[in-house]
Amino acid sequence: MRYSTFGKSGYQVSSLGFGAMNLPSVPLEQAREALNYALDHGINYIDTAAAYRNSEEIIGECISHRRSEYFLATKTGARDYETAKAEIERSLVRMRTDHVDLLQIHYVNNVTEYQKAMAPEGAYKAALEAQREGKVRFIGISGHRPDLLVKWISKGQFSQILFHLNLAQPFALDELIPKATEMDLMKVAMKPLSGGFIQPVDLAIRYPYSQDVHVTISGMVSIKEVQENIAAQEREVGDAERRELEQLAEELGQHNCRRCNYCSCPLEIAIPDVMISSKFRDKFGLLPKGNGFFERQKDKLLGCAEHDPCKVNPLCEPKCPYQLPMQSVIQRAASFY
Ligand code: SF4
Ligand code: SF4
Protein backbone atom coordinates (compact mmCIF):
# COMPACT_ATOMS: atom_id res chain seq x y z
CA MET A 1 0.00 0.00 0.00
CA ARG A 2 1.26 3.43 -0.89
CA TYR A 3 0.94 6.28 1.64
CA SER A 4 1.22 10.00 0.98
CA THR A 5 0.86 13.24 2.89
CA PHE A 6 -2.80 14.15 2.63
CA GLY A 7 -2.90 17.81 1.61
CA LYS A 8 -2.32 20.17 4.49
CA SER A 9 -3.58 17.66 7.07
CA GLY A 10 -0.16 16.04 7.45
CA TYR A 11 -1.89 12.65 7.67
CA GLN A 12 -0.20 9.73 5.91
CA VAL A 13 -3.16 8.41 3.99
CA SER A 14 -3.40 5.07 2.20
CA SER A 15 -3.82 5.16 -1.58
CA LEU A 16 -6.89 2.94 -1.28
CA GLY A 17 -9.90 4.10 0.70
CA PHE A 18 -12.84 1.99 1.86
CA GLY A 19 -16.08 3.16 0.29
CA ALA A 20 -18.83 2.13 2.71
CA MET A 21 -21.83 3.08 0.59
CA ASN A 22 -22.90 -0.48 -0.19
CA LEU A 23 -22.38 -2.02 3.26
CA PRO A 24 -26.09 -1.71 4.12
CA SER A 25 -26.77 -4.29 1.38
CA VAL A 26 -24.83 -7.11 3.04
CA PRO A 27 -25.19 -8.96 6.38
CA LEU A 28 -23.70 -7.07 9.32
CA GLU A 29 -21.10 -9.77 10.04
CA GLN A 30 -19.84 -9.62 6.47
CA ALA A 31 -19.54 -5.84 6.74
CA ARG A 32 -17.69 -6.21 10.05
CA GLU A 33 -15.20 -8.64 8.51
CA ALA A 34 -14.60 -6.49 5.44
CA LEU A 35 -14.03 -3.29 7.42
CA ASN A 36 -11.71 -4.91 9.96
CA TYR A 37 -9.81 -6.78 7.26
CA ALA A 38 -9.29 -3.48 5.43
CA LEU A 39 -7.89 -1.81 8.57
CA ASP A 40 -5.71 -4.84 9.30
CA HIS A 41 -4.25 -4.63 5.79
CA GLY A 42 -3.27 -0.98 5.68
CA ILE A 43 -6.38 0.91 4.53
CA ASN A 44 -6.75 3.95 6.76
CA TYR A 45 -9.39 6.04 4.97
CA ILE A 46 -13.09 5.27 5.46
CA ASP A 47 -15.66 7.09 3.36
CA THR A 48 -19.38 7.25 4.02
CA ALA A 49 -22.26 9.76 3.94
CA ALA A 50 -25.34 10.62 5.93
CA ALA A 51 -27.36 9.60 2.88
CA TYR A 52 -25.99 6.06 2.56
CA ARG A 53 -28.84 4.37 4.43
CA ASN A 54 -27.37 2.95 7.69
CA SER A 55 -23.76 2.88 6.48
CA GLU A 56 -22.69 5.26 9.26
CA GLU A 57 -24.30 3.05 11.89
CA ILE A 58 -22.49 0.01 10.51
CA ILE A 59 -19.18 1.84 10.79
CA GLY A 60 -20.03 2.79 14.36
CA GLU A 61 -20.98 -0.77 15.22
CA CYS A 62 -18.04 -2.48 13.51
CA ILE A 63 -14.96 -0.27 13.87
CA SER A 64 -15.60 2.57 16.31
CA HIS A 65 -13.41 0.70 18.81
CA ARG A 66 -10.51 1.26 16.34
CA ARG A 67 -11.27 4.94 15.75
CA SER A 68 -7.62 6.09 15.98
CA GLU A 69 -6.67 3.82 13.06
CA TYR A 70 -8.54 5.62 10.28
CA PHE A 71 -9.31 8.98 8.73
CA LEU A 72 -13.09 9.19 8.83
CA ALA A 73 -14.88 11.03 6.05
CA THR A 74 -18.61 11.60 5.84
CA LYS A 75 -20.89 13.96 3.93
CA THR A 76 -23.95 16.07 4.40
CA GLY A 77 -26.39 16.41 1.54
CA ALA A 78 -28.26 19.18 3.37
CA ARG A 79 -28.06 22.66 1.91
CA ASP A 80 -29.42 24.72 4.81
CA TYR A 81 -27.79 25.42 8.15
CA GLU A 82 -30.32 23.78 10.48
CA THR A 83 -30.62 20.51 8.55
CA ALA A 84 -26.86 20.23 8.04
CA LYS A 85 -26.21 20.90 11.74
CA ALA A 86 -28.66 18.16 12.71
CA GLU A 87 -27.17 15.80 10.14
CA ILE A 88 -23.61 16.35 11.42
CA GLU A 89 -24.72 15.65 14.99
CA ARG A 90 -26.53 12.53 13.85
CA SER A 91 -23.45 11.30 11.97
CA LEU A 92 -21.36 11.55 15.14
CA VAL A 93 -23.91 9.60 17.14
CA ARG A 94 -24.31 6.97 14.44
CA MET A 95 -20.55 6.47 14.08
CA ARG A 96 -19.97 6.55 17.85
CA THR A 97 -17.27 9.19 17.68
CA ASP A 98 -16.77 12.73 18.94
CA HIS A 99 -15.37 13.98 15.63
CA VAL A 100 -15.06 13.22 11.94
CA ASP A 101 -11.84 14.02 10.13
CA LEU A 102 -13.63 15.27 7.07
CA LEU A 103 -17.09 16.58 6.34
CA GLN A 104 -17.92 16.99 2.66
CA ILE A 105 -20.74 19.05 1.24
CA HIS A 106 -22.25 16.22 -0.76
CA TYR A 107 -23.19 15.99 -4.43
CA VAL A 108 -22.99 19.62 -5.47
CA ASN A 109 -23.61 19.58 -9.20
CA ASN A 110 -24.95 22.97 -10.15
CA VAL A 111 -24.61 26.63 -9.26
CA THR A 112 -27.95 26.83 -7.45
CA GLU A 113 -27.03 23.97 -5.12
CA TYR A 114 -23.64 25.51 -4.47
CA GLN A 115 -25.12 28.93 -3.71
CA LYS A 116 -27.63 27.41 -1.29
CA ALA A 117 -24.91 25.52 0.61
CA MET A 118 -22.61 28.55 0.76
CA ALA A 119 -25.32 31.11 1.66
CA PRO A 120 -25.07 32.85 5.06
CA GLU A 121 -27.60 30.34 6.47
CA GLY A 122 -26.36 27.41 4.39
CA ALA A 123 -24.78 24.04 5.14
CA TYR A 124 -21.26 25.47 5.00
CA LYS A 125 -22.03 27.59 8.07
CA ALA A 126 -22.94 24.43 10.00
CA ALA A 127 -19.71 22.78 8.84
CA LEU A 128 -17.64 25.76 9.99
CA GLU A 129 -19.42 25.81 13.34
CA ALA A 130 -18.79 22.08 13.83
CA GLN A 131 -15.15 22.67 12.92
CA ARG A 132 -14.84 25.39 15.59
CA GLU A 133 -16.36 22.97 18.10
CA GLY A 134 -13.86 20.24 17.22
CA LYS A 135 -16.50 17.95 15.73
CA VAL A 136 -15.15 18.26 12.20
CA ARG A 137 -11.46 18.64 11.37
CA PHE A 138 -11.61 19.50 7.66
CA ILE A 139 -14.30 20.59 5.22
CA GLY A 140 -14.49 19.34 1.65
CA ILE A 141 -16.85 19.22 -1.30
CA SER A 142 -17.97 16.44 -3.63
CA GLY A 143 -19.61 16.60 -7.03
CA HIS A 144 -19.77 15.34 -10.57
CA ARG A 145 -18.91 18.51 -12.47
CA PRO A 146 -15.12 18.95 -12.60
CA ASP A 147 -15.56 22.20 -14.54
CA LEU A 148 -17.63 23.72 -11.71
CA LEU A 149 -15.67 22.14 -8.86
CA VAL A 150 -12.48 23.79 -10.09
CA LYS A 151 -14.13 27.21 -9.82
CA TRP A 152 -15.52 26.48 -6.37
CA ILE A 153 -12.28 25.22 -4.84
CA SER A 154 -10.46 28.27 -6.23
CA LYS A 155 -12.30 30.40 -3.68
CA GLY A 156 -10.24 28.77 -0.92
CA GLN A 157 -13.04 27.54 1.39
CA PHE A 158 -12.35 23.81 1.10
CA SER A 159 -9.47 21.59 2.20
CA GLN A 160 -10.52 18.57 0.18
CA ILE A 161 -12.14 17.65 -3.09
CA LEU A 162 -13.95 14.42 -4.03
CA PHE A 163 -14.47 13.77 -7.75
CA HIS A 164 -15.05 10.86 -10.08
CA LEU A 165 -12.04 9.49 -11.92
CA ASN A 166 -12.12 6.26 -13.84
CA LEU A 167 -11.23 4.87 -17.26
CA ALA A 168 -14.60 5.98 -18.57
CA GLN A 169 -14.54 9.41 -16.87
CA PRO A 170 -11.07 10.96 -16.97
CA PHE A 171 -12.32 14.56 -16.96
CA ALA A 172 -10.92 15.62 -13.57
CA LEU A 173 -7.43 15.45 -15.09
CA ASP A 174 -7.96 18.50 -17.30
CA GLU A 175 -8.13 21.29 -14.73
CA LEU A 176 -9.44 20.04 -11.41
CA ILE A 177 -6.56 17.86 -10.26
CA PRO A 178 -3.84 20.34 -11.32
CA LYS A 179 -5.67 23.15 -9.47
CA ALA A 180 -6.13 21.02 -6.35
CA THR A 181 -2.43 20.12 -6.46
CA GLU A 182 -1.47 23.78 -6.80
CA MET A 183 -3.62 24.54 -3.71
CA ASP A 184 -2.30 21.51 -1.78
CA LEU A 185 -5.82 20.16 -1.24
CA MET A 186 -6.62 16.60 -0.25
CA LYS A 187 -7.49 14.86 -3.54
CA VAL A 188 -9.85 11.91 -3.38
CA ALA A 189 -11.00 10.04 -6.48
CA MET A 190 -14.22 8.06 -6.42
CA LYS A 191 -16.00 5.50 -8.59
CA PRO A 192 -12.94 3.71 -10.03
CA LEU A 193 -15.35 1.02 -11.27
CA SER A 194 -17.93 3.62 -12.28
CA GLY A 195 -20.33 2.44 -9.60
CA GLY A 196 -19.46 -1.27 -9.94
CA PHE A 197 -20.06 -1.39 -13.70
CA ILE A 198 -16.69 -1.62 -15.38
CA GLN A 199 -13.98 -4.21 -15.69
CA PRO A 200 -11.28 -5.53 -15.68
CA VAL A 201 -11.08 -4.53 -12.01
CA ASP A 202 -7.29 -4.51 -11.99
CA LEU A 203 -7.04 -1.98 -14.86
CA ALA A 204 -9.90 0.07 -13.49
CA ILE A 205 -8.26 0.44 -10.06
CA ARG A 206 -4.81 1.05 -11.48
CA TYR A 207 -5.93 3.98 -13.60
CA PRO A 208 -6.73 6.47 -10.78
CA TYR A 209 -3.84 4.94 -8.83
CA SER A 210 -1.54 6.05 -11.67
CA GLN A 211 -2.69 9.65 -11.37
CA ASP A 212 -1.96 12.56 -9.06
CA VAL A 213 -4.49 11.73 -6.35
CA HIS A 214 -3.98 10.79 -2.71
CA VAL A 215 -6.80 8.29 -2.26
CA THR A 216 -9.05 6.28 -4.53
CA ILE A 217 -12.18 5.18 -2.73
CA SER A 218 -13.64 1.96 -3.96
CA GLY A 219 -16.96 0.57 -2.75
CA MET A 220 -16.28 -2.76 -1.04
CA VAL A 221 -18.53 -5.20 0.77
CA SER A 222 -16.45 -8.33 1.41
CA ILE A 223 -12.98 -9.54 2.29
CA LYS A 224 -12.64 -10.84 -1.27
CA GLU A 225 -13.31 -7.41 -2.73
CA VAL A 226 -10.86 -5.77 -0.31
CA GLN A 227 -8.21 -8.31 -1.34
CA GLU A 228 -8.91 -7.71 -5.03
CA ASN A 229 -8.65 -3.93 -4.61
CA ILE A 230 -5.46 -4.10 -2.55
CA ALA A 231 -3.88 -6.51 -5.05
CA ALA A 232 -4.53 -4.04 -7.87
CA GLN A 233 -2.38 -1.47 -6.04
CA GLU A 234 0.44 -3.77 -5.04
CA ARG A 235 2.76 -2.74 -7.86
CA GLU A 236 3.61 0.86 -8.70
CA VAL A 237 2.57 2.06 -12.15
CA GLY A 238 5.50 2.68 -14.50
CA ASP A 239 5.60 5.32 -17.26
CA ALA A 240 4.74 2.89 -20.06
CA GLU A 241 1.71 1.50 -18.22
CA ARG A 242 0.59 5.01 -17.29
CA ARG A 243 0.63 6.04 -20.94
CA GLU A 244 -1.35 2.95 -21.93
CA LEU A 245 -3.95 3.62 -19.24
CA GLU A 246 -4.24 7.25 -20.31
CA GLN A 247 -4.73 6.28 -23.96
CA LEU A 248 -7.40 3.82 -22.95
CA ALA A 249 -9.16 6.46 -20.84
CA GLU A 250 -9.06 8.87 -23.75
CA GLU A 251 -10.74 6.30 -25.96
CA LEU A 252 -13.31 5.19 -23.39
CA GLY A 253 -14.08 8.76 -22.31
CA GLN A 254 -15.08 9.85 -25.82
CA HIS A 255 -18.74 9.70 -24.80
CA ASN A 256 -17.96 12.97 -22.96
CA CYS A 257 -20.82 12.57 -20.48
CA ARG A 258 -19.89 14.28 -17.20
CA ARG A 259 -22.83 12.84 -15.26
CA CYS A 260 -24.13 16.32 -14.55
CA ASN A 261 -27.69 14.93 -14.55
CA TYR A 262 -29.10 17.95 -16.37
CA CYS A 263 -30.82 15.66 -18.85
CA SER A 264 -33.99 13.76 -18.14
CA CYS A 265 -36.07 11.35 -20.12
CA PRO A 266 -39.86 10.89 -19.97
CA LEU A 267 -39.27 7.12 -20.22
CA GLU A 268 -36.90 7.35 -17.23
CA ILE A 269 -33.94 6.01 -19.15
CA ALA A 270 -30.85 6.43 -16.98
CA ILE A 271 -29.08 8.39 -19.71
CA PRO A 272 -25.71 9.08 -17.98
CA ASP A 273 -25.21 5.43 -17.01
CA VAL A 274 -25.89 4.32 -20.58
CA MET A 275 -23.65 7.04 -22.03
CA ILE A 276 -20.73 6.31 -19.72
CA SER A 277 -20.80 2.54 -19.91
CA SER A 278 -21.63 2.04 -23.62
CA LYS A 279 -18.08 2.35 -24.94
CA PHE A 280 -16.79 0.22 -22.11
CA ARG A 281 -19.41 -2.40 -22.80
CA ASP A 282 -18.25 -2.64 -26.42
CA LYS A 283 -14.59 -3.02 -25.52
CA PHE A 284 -14.43 -5.07 -22.32
CA GLY A 285 -17.95 -6.08 -21.37
CA LEU A 286 -19.30 -5.04 -17.98
CA LEU A 287 -19.30 -6.41 -14.46
CA PRO A 288 -22.52 -8.25 -13.44
CA LYS A 289 -23.93 -5.07 -11.90
CA GLY A 290 -23.43 -3.26 -15.21
CA ASN A 291 -25.05 -6.06 -17.21
CA GLY A 292 -27.93 -6.17 -14.73
CA PHE A 293 -28.43 -2.46 -15.23
CA PHE A 294 -28.75 -2.84 -19.02
CA GLU A 295 -31.08 -5.81 -18.60
CA ARG A 296 -33.37 -3.76 -16.34
CA GLN A 297 -33.30 -0.81 -18.75
CA LYS A 298 -34.01 -2.99 -21.80
CA ASP A 299 -37.69 -2.11 -22.31
CA LYS A 300 -37.06 1.57 -21.78
CA LEU A 301 -34.15 1.55 -24.21
CA LEU A 302 -36.32 -0.16 -26.82
CA GLY A 303 -39.02 2.45 -26.17
CA CYS A 304 -36.75 5.35 -27.13
CA ALA A 305 -37.08 4.79 -30.89
CA GLU A 306 -40.88 4.59 -30.59
CA HIS A 307 -41.36 7.63 -28.40
CA ASP A 308 -43.30 10.03 -30.66
CA PRO A 309 -42.41 13.33 -28.92
CA CYS A 310 -38.73 12.60 -29.58
CA LYS A 311 -39.01 11.52 -33.19
CA VAL A 312 -38.19 14.91 -34.70
CA ASN A 313 -36.27 16.49 -31.84
CA PRO A 314 -35.03 14.37 -28.92
CA LEU A 315 -36.32 15.93 -25.69
CA CYS A 316 -33.14 15.11 -23.80
CA GLU A 317 -30.47 16.56 -26.04
CA PRO A 318 -31.17 20.33 -25.71
CA LYS A 319 -30.62 19.97 -21.93
CA CYS A 320 -27.06 18.72 -22.31
CA PRO A 321 -24.42 21.41 -21.77
CA TYR A 322 -22.02 19.33 -23.87
CA GLN A 323 -24.39 18.88 -26.84
CA LEU A 324 -24.03 15.10 -26.69
CA PRO A 325 -25.92 12.78 -29.08
CA MET A 326 -27.78 10.87 -26.39
CA GLN A 327 -30.59 9.58 -28.61
CA SER A 328 -28.22 7.77 -30.97
CA VAL A 329 -26.26 6.24 -28.09
CA ILE A 330 -29.48 5.05 -26.42
CA GLN A 331 -30.79 3.59 -29.65
CA ARG A 332 -27.52 1.83 -30.33
CA ALA A 333 -27.69 0.29 -26.84
CA ALA A 334 -31.26 -0.81 -27.68
CA SER A 335 -30.03 -2.44 -30.91
CA PHE A 336 -28.33 -5.18 -28.80
CA TYR A 337 -31.86 -6.40 -28.01
S1 SF4 B 1 -34.64 10.67 -27.19
FE1 SF4 B 1 -34.86 8.76 -26.06
S2 SF4 B 1 -33.54 9.07 -24.30
FE2 SF4 B 1 -33.91 11.10 -25.12
S3 SF4 B 1 -35.69 11.86 -24.01
FE3 SF4 B 1 -36.44 10.89 -25.85
S4 SF4 B 1 -36.94 8.80 -25.25
FE4 SF4 B 1 -35.60 9.65 -23.67
S1 SF4 C 1 -25.73 13.30 -21.22
FE1 SF4 C 1 -25.18 15.46 -21.04
S2 SF4 C 1 -26.76 16.32 -19.70
FE2 SF4 C 1 -26.89 14.11 -19.47
S3 SF4 C 1 -25.61 13.68 -17.70
FE3 SF4 C 1 -24.33 13.44 -19.50
S4 SF4 C 1 -23.33 15.42 -19.77
FE4 SF4 C 1 -25.06 15.74 -18.38
Image: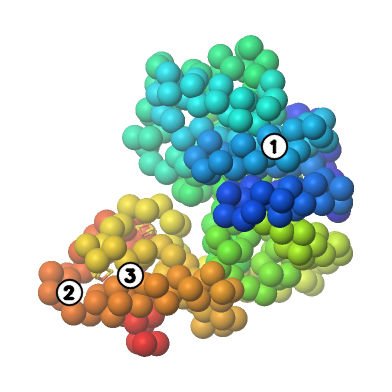
Q: Position of residue 56 (x, y in %)?
A: 61, 37
- Nearer-N-terminus badge (3/1): 1
Q: Position of residue 253 (x, y in %)?
A: 52, 68
Q: Residue at x 34, y 35 (%)?
A: 112
- Cα distance between the residues tagged 3 and 2: 14 Å
Q: Residue at x 61, y 25 (%)?
A: 93
Q: Which amino acid type corresponds to the residue marked 2 in the rendered image?
A: His
Q: Position of residue 258 (x, y in %)?
A: 45, 57
In the picture, measured across the screen, residue 173 lies left or right of residue 109, that is: right
Q: Which amino acid type corresponds to the residue marked 3 in the rendered image?
A: Met
In the picture, measured across the screen, residue 226 lies left or right of residue 24, that is: right
Identify the residue position indicated by label 1 in the image: 61
Out of 109 and 77, give the one closest to the viewer. Answer: 77
The residue carrying mark 2 has its beta carbon less than 8 Å from ligand 1? yes
Q: Position of residue 62 (x, y in %)?
A: 73, 40
Density class for disc 2 (Cα within 10 Å; few <14, some 14-19, many ≥20) is: few
Q: Residue at x 64, y 22 (%)?
A: 136
The residue carrying mark 3 has its beta carbon less than 8 Å from ligand 2? yes
Identify the residue position indicated by label 2 in the image: 307
Q: Which quarter shows the C terminus?
A: bottom left
- Cα distance between the residues tagged 3 and 1: 44 Å
